Amino acid sequence: MLSKILSGGVVGIEGIPVTVEVDITKKGFGSFKIVGLAGKAVDESRERVFAALENTGIEFPKYRVTVNLAPADIPKDGPTYDLPIAIGILQASEKLPNKLDLSNAMFFGEVSLDGTLNATPAILPLTLLAKSHNIPNVYVPAINAKEAAIVDGINVYPVADIQSLVLHLTGEKLLEIATENTRDVYPTNKNQQDEIKLEDIKGQDYAKRALIIAAAGGHNIIFSGPPGAGKTMLARVLPSLMPPLTKDESISVTQIYSIAHLLDPHTPLMHERPFRAPHHTTSRVGLVGGGTQLSPGEITLAHRGVLFLDEIPEFPRSVTESLRQVMEDRTVTITRAKGSVTFPASFMMIAANNPCPCGYSGSDQTCTCTQTQILNYKKRLSGPLLDRIDIHSFVTAIDPTIILRGNRSVLDNGNQNTNEESKDNITTDSARKTIVSARNMQNQRFSDHNINTNAEMNAPLVQQYCTLTNELEEIMISASKKLGLSARSMHKTLKVARTIADLEQSEHIHRTHLLEAIGYRKKSNS
């Protein structure tokens, strides 16, 4: 007898429909084969499903069993197909009612040897697949039910084990559909008191201002300065300044983490922007993605969030150069012999570097590096890569009195230096409100353009929304000639100026906005 069970796999972050066909025939010797370009994990389903059915008390058919995963030209991998294979065998061996129609349901899940269902990756994109194909019912492991229930308009049946599913399909004891409260956004256990706040960073008014502009417009930013000046702290405060994820953004980020096996089953929907900080020993595959399974890399895991590259010159040049196209396209396509996948990679990059190998070039500390060492160190970052970074900010060493005594010490000592903070009372909360207001302006501006921030504008949009008066055009032309700005750098300057105007809720770019934006184009390795 032949049965057909609907299931699915994942290519990139998108689900693809797969039909599990099971044929049982009494001709020939007893066997169990899986065909249809099945990978190692799928091939091992034979042993898992056999043991699961036997240990559940269901006799495995002693005939020739052939399982085909259609379409046969797409590679299949992972344990997702265990459950549909088991159900297909039960239906083909007539252990389920003959009139049972399963054409309106999809089955996903890894089966344990005792018949229980284990947590299975990629349940969210697979449930979205069911919705896109108008399949109203999905059966998933109970531990993944909250993740699947994020998708509206789908009946999600949590399955604890094969036996309970059989009782449901035979009508003896029905499973309860995942309730509406499982669709809520689940907060993380992150302690807000442990977060680094903007007010915790002493001094660095110029760098803080640059960070706020970057957060408001989604701009890439690089900080350059001596060790211990606060570059890493500035980077780690960035996620708290950014607005929360929208529902659509949350789903897209959750899809990625579900596929990467990084999603906590007890926190089915991610609502905080990702912050990824890979070590400088990370390989190119680790950063961009790929490998034997074509898995997402750090840049995709940072989608809709922040990618922090600390000590960026220490990364291999081949690794940092791989970011150039991604920063423009905001997607990454990986092609291997087994296929090609495209992952989203719309992230904010924040980088930090020292001015030289010892870190003290240009500071009050004595630099021990030779000119040749400094030159070779700066050459680790190419001009084209730096050209793609919107904001370049230098971070100066902090006066020790500010660190030990706070802002009051500046007034007590009468020390008026570049780190003075007495007039700067900005907090994380106040900065976030200003940033959210600027983002709201951008959301309205780009509501018909399928982008969210100023940093994502292409050339036509820059021309449309970053108009300058004749006076400002002359300033821009003069700055371009003096600083040697490329066409890309000029566009990035205009984007930053547009963001500065948005922070002031200004409809037009004014002189002060443009001049400040030009000030951020001095590259940190120049």
Image (cartoon, grey):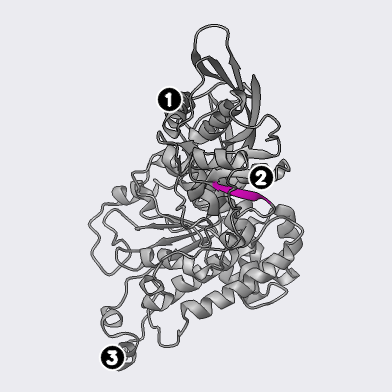
Nearer to us of marks 3 and 1 is 1
- In front of the other: 449 or 109: 109
Q: How far apart are marks 3 and 1 (CA)?
A: 77 Å
In the image, taking residue 508 as reference, residue 64 lies left or right, namely: left
**Residue 93 on image: x %, y %:** 58, 23
Most distant residue in the bottom direction:
412
Tell me, yes or no, whether the two marked residues, 2 and 3, touch with CB atoms within 8 Å.
no
Q: What element carries label 2?
A: strand
Residue under the point 39% across and 46% down: 380
Mark 3 neighbour density, 10 Å: few (under 14) some (14–19) many (20 or more): few
Residue under the point 60% across and 72% down: 436
Report the amino acid beneath label 1: Glu
The answer to which of marks 2 and 3 sits earlier in the sequence is 2
Q: Distance between the residues labelled 2 and 3?
A: 71 Å
- In front of the other: 152 or 432: 152
**Residue 221 on image: x %, y %:** 49, 60
Q: Residue 413 carries which label?
A: 3
**Residue 132 on image: x %, y %:** 71, 44
- Name the residue that disc number 1 marks: 47
Q: What element carries label 1?
A: helix
Q: Write the start and end of the magenta stretch as one range.
A: 154-158
Q: Residue 137 carries which label?
A: 2
The answer to which of marks 2 and 1 sits earlier in the sequence is 1
**Residue 450 on image: x %, y %:** 71, 55
Query: In the image, is residue 27 above or below residue 207?
Result: above
